């Protein structure tokens, strides 16, 4: 198998190397991979991903003391068209969407949702006529084709995003322009810098996170904060080695609920790195990945205060993830190998936009993957992983825990260490035209 094909297989399958995380924690989200060509061509990619889990309790663990269980069937798809509309110009168009059926079967927390997800359209235009510099502009639009309001038991279908991939099924219109540049330092080394701003539109959900009774359901208007993000990256590919390092900083405006400021998320930092090595002959390629996310303290609504106040201490969680996979070249067009990952979330966290409490935990996964290339335009890939999750113990009845919304200590609920296990299997194809 040629070196380029082997590196492509890592790119196609590497989206599974680490566990799924909520969008608030990790802005990078797994999607079907696509190929960018220097000539006009279209690439279609899709997968069928199935998740099943069971544990000591369901989601949220305070909602029922019965053993928990659930499943999710997710079918993402993507279409990319790339080419050169004129001399020295490169245009890449990308559309992404999906369909999901999410079901929790925990007694007392049972619920099911079936819906298409939001649709994302992206366009990137790069100018190649300047020696040593490639400026680009991009625009990304999120269309609210998914379901954000979940009345009745449907709300129970939102499950822990460390056990299933999709934890939220829709939001509002988002428009995000970006400007940046690629700087080829050498034939093997590339620097990239960009600044983007995302206007996030208002949408409805089924209950207010400020309700005195959190089980109450009432139509609530949510206007999430806009996001300014600066990103820097460096990438290298030469000989058997390929690596990249990316860092970003995001600043967010106030999130408004029913016309009143609710909170302002703290500044977010993300660092991610990928390293791969191609071994001689059939020994294939090893890929290592790592990521770290941190958020500063939020500004929150403190009871009846006139303005938002910085919380007493940081209620956000730091997230650490590492992953490794190896592909052995069994034949010129077939590769197979093991994969594994580890995730550590150091603190209980709550995402007011997705209505999800995400507990502190450790998550391990181990499995295998395979890729078969019918030719240089059609490939198939499969993957299977087993997952183990241990959530941290929480306070006993009558104990105190910190509330983000109240910015004060409130009575806590008893939750012991919760252990869960699950499976993820996926199969998909990539086709170029």
Image: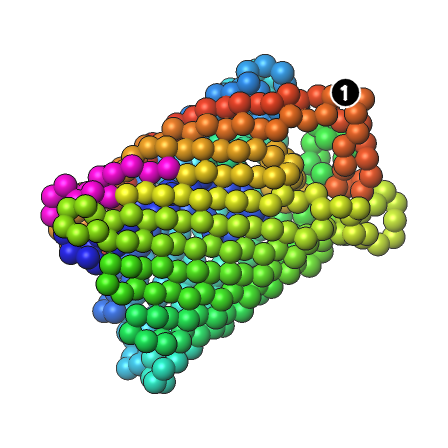
In what quadrant of the picture does the C terminus appear? bottom left
Residue 389 vs residue 398: left or right? left
| Residue furthest front as drawn | 280
Q: Position of residue 384 (x, y in %)?
A: 32, 32
Residue 336 colored in magenta in the image = yes
Taking the spot 45% from the left edge, 33% from the top edge, the residue there is: 364
What are the residue bounds of the magenta stretch?
327-340
Q: Position of residue 44 (x, y in %)?
A: 28, 52
- Residue 144 lies, with reference to residue 395, above or below; the image says below
Taking the spot 37% from the left edge, 32% from the top edge, the residue there is: 366
Taking the spot 54% from the left edge, 61% from the top edge, the residue there is: 248
- Residue 281 lies, with reference to residue 356, above or below; the image says below
Q: Who is closer to the viewer here, 19 or 42?
A: 19
- Residue 200 lies, with reference to residue 340, above or below; the image says below
Q: Who is closer to the viewer here, 373 or 157?
A: 373
Q: Who is closer to the viewer here, 290 or 169?
A: 290
Kindly state the secondary structure of the residue where label 1 is placed: loop
In which image quadrant can residue 57 be found? top right
Q: Position of residue 339 (x, y in %)?
A: 33, 38
Residue 19 colored in magenta in the image = no
Is residue 166 at least partly visible in the picture?
no
Check disc 1: other Cα within 10 Å, few if <14, some if 14-19, many if 20+: few
Instruction: Kindly identify which residue carries mark 1.
Output: 397
Is residue 17 at least partly visible in the picture?
yes
Q: Who is closer to the viewer here, 15 or 352?
A: 15
Q: Position of residue 350 (x, y in %)?
A: 65, 39
Query: What secondary structure predominates along the stretch shown in magenta?
Result: strand
Taking the spot 71% from the left edge, 51% from the top edge, the residue there is: 297
């Amino acid at each position: 198998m040629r070196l380029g094909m082997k590196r492509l297989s890592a790119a196609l399958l590497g989206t599974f190397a680490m566990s799924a995380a909520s969008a608030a924690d990790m802005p990078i989200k797994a999607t079907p991979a696509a190929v960018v060509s220097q000539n006009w061509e279209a690439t279609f990619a899709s997968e069928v991903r199935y998740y099943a889990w069971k544990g000591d309790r369901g989601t949220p663990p305070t909602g029922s003391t019965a053993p928990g269980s659930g499943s999710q069937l997710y079918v993402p798809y993507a279409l990319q068209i790339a080419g050169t509309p004129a001399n020295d110009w490169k245009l890449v168009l990308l559309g992404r969407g999906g369909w999901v059926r999410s079901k929790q079967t925990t007694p007392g927390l049972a619920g099911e949702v079936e819906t298409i997800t939001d649709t994302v359209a992206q366009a990137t235009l790069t100018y190649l006529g300047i020696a040593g510099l490639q400026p680009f502009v991009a625009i990304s639009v999120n269309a609210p084709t998914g379901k954000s309001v979940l009345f009745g038991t449907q709300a129970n279908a939102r499950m822990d995003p460390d056990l299933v991939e999709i934890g939220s099924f829709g939001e509002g219109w988002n428009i995000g322009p970006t400007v940046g540049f690629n700087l080829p330092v050498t034939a093997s080394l590339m620097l990239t810098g960009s600044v983007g701003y995302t206007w996030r539109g208002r949408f409805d959900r089924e209950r207010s996170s400020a309700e005195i009774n959190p089980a109450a359901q009432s139509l609530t208007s949510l206007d999430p904060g806009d996001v300014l993000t600066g990103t820097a990256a460096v990438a290298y590919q030469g000989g058997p080695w390929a690596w990249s390092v990316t860092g970003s900083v995001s600043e967010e405006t106030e999130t408004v609920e029913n016309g009143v400021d609710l909170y302002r998320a703290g500044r977010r930092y993300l660092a991610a790195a990928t390293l791969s090595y191609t071994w001689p002959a059939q020994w294939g390629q090893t890929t290592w990945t790592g990521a770290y996310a941190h958020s500063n303290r939020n500004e929150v609504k403190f009871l009846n205060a006139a303005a938002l106040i910085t919380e007493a201490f940081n209620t956000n969680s730091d997230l650490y993830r590492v992953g490794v996979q190896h592909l052995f070249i069994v034949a010129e067009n077939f590769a197979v190998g093991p994969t594994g990952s580890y995730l550590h979330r150091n603190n209980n966290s709550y995402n007011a936009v997705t209505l999800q409490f995400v507990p502190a935990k450790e998550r391990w996964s181990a499995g295998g993957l395979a890729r078969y290339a019918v030719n240089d335009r059609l490939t198939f890939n499969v993957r299977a992983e087993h997952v183990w999750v241990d959530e941290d113990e929480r306070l006993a009845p009558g104990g105190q825990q910190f509330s983000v919304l109240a910015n004060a200590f409130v009575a806590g609920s008893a939750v012991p260490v919760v252990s869960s296990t699950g499976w993820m299997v996926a199969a998909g194809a990539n086709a170029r035209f």
